[in-house]
Image: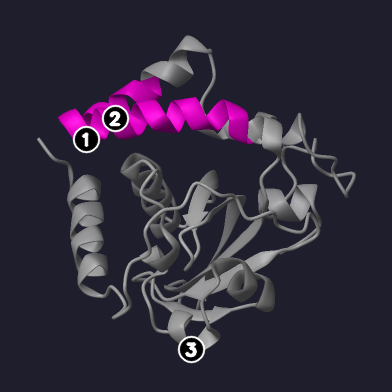
């Protein structure tokens, strides 16, 4: 039986589909966009995932004009190779004011792709109500992407045949087989392949997002 969180995510996904921008969807092209290793792709959305602001690095990497992005659903840069279960996991976390890091393959307006590692900051008002989601992205390390690609491929294949619930169970089994959980697995892929710019990454009780602790950005 579908639980409340799954239904909420499915309802959100359906609503997001209705908000697709009136632009021709690009055809995927198997050519990678090389991002500047120092770039930080930032976007701010409302609680429905509609883009309210994006910085220059985000605009440049996407290939869209700023006016095409603002007001569009964030799925404007979604690549069809991405497993839906990863987005489901992200939405469940941030809607509960919890942080999450994810590797994401995005698609530019040209159809070309680029890999990023994404972290979130949940924005609240004085009443503790969520008002916005700020997403920070940096270029994903090549070795980490090489490990993620076959996992995402299997998740996507399972979803196409048996749905998102099956892929979610497979992801849990995959992590269990490695005696780890999602957060530890993803953070290790980053820490093993990227040099930290701060001294706080090993302080487990350090406040703030992973990007703040590891890269010193928020």
Q: Is residue 95 magenta?
A: no
Q: Which residue is mark 2?
A: 157
Please give the count of numbered marks on the rendered protein. 3
Q: Quadrant of residue 161?
A: top left
Taking the spot 63% from the left edge, 73% from the top edge, the residue there is 60
Residue furthest left in the image = 1
Q: Which residues are magenta?
A: 145-172
Q: Position of residue 100 (x, y in %)?
A: 53, 47
Q: Is residue 179 above or below residue 113?
A: above
Q: Is residue 166 magenta?
A: yes
Q: Which residue is mark 3?
A: 67
Q: Which residue is mark 1?
A: 160
Res 4 seen here:
yes
* Quadrant showing the C terminus: bottom right
Q: Is residue 154 above or below residue 86?
A: above
Mark 2 touches mark 1? (CB < 8 Å)? yes
What is the distance, in whole Å, between disc 2 and disc 3 at their CAs? 35 Å
Res 98 seen here:
no
Of callouts 1 and 3, the N-terminal one: 3
Front-lying residue, 190 or 160 = 160
Classified by dominant secondary structure, the portion drawn in magenta counts as: helix
Q: Is residue 115 above or below residue 64?
A: above
Taking the spot 47% from the left edge, 57% from the top edge, the residue there is 97
């Amino acid at each position: 039986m579908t639980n409340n969180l799954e239904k909420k995510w499915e309802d959100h996904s359906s609503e997001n589909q209705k908000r697709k921008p009136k632009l021709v969807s690009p055809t995927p092209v198997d050519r990678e966009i090389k991002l500047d290793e120092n770039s930080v792709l930032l976007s701010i959305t409302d609680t429905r995932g509609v883009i309210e602001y994006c910085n220059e690095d985000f605009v440049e990497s996407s290939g869209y004009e700023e006016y095409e992005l603002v007001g569009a659903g964030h799925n404007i840069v979604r690549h069809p190779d991405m497993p839906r279960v990863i987005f489901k996991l992200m939405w469940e976390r941030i809607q509960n004011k919890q942080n999450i890091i994810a590797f994401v393959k995005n698609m530019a307006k040209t159809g070309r792709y680029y890999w990023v590692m994404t972290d979130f900051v949940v924005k609240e008002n004085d009443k503790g109500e969520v008002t916005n989601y700020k997403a920070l992205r940096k270029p994903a390390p090549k070795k980490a992407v090489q490990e993620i690609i076959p996992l995402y491929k299997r998740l996507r294949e399972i979803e196409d045949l048996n749905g998102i619930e099956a892929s979610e169970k497979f992801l849990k089994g995959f992590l269990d087989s490695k005696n780890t959980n999602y957060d530890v697995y993803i953070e290790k892929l980053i820490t093993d392949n990227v040099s930290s710019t701060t001294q706080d990454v090993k302080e487990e009780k350090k406040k703030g997002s992973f990007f703040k602790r590891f890269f010193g950005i928020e």
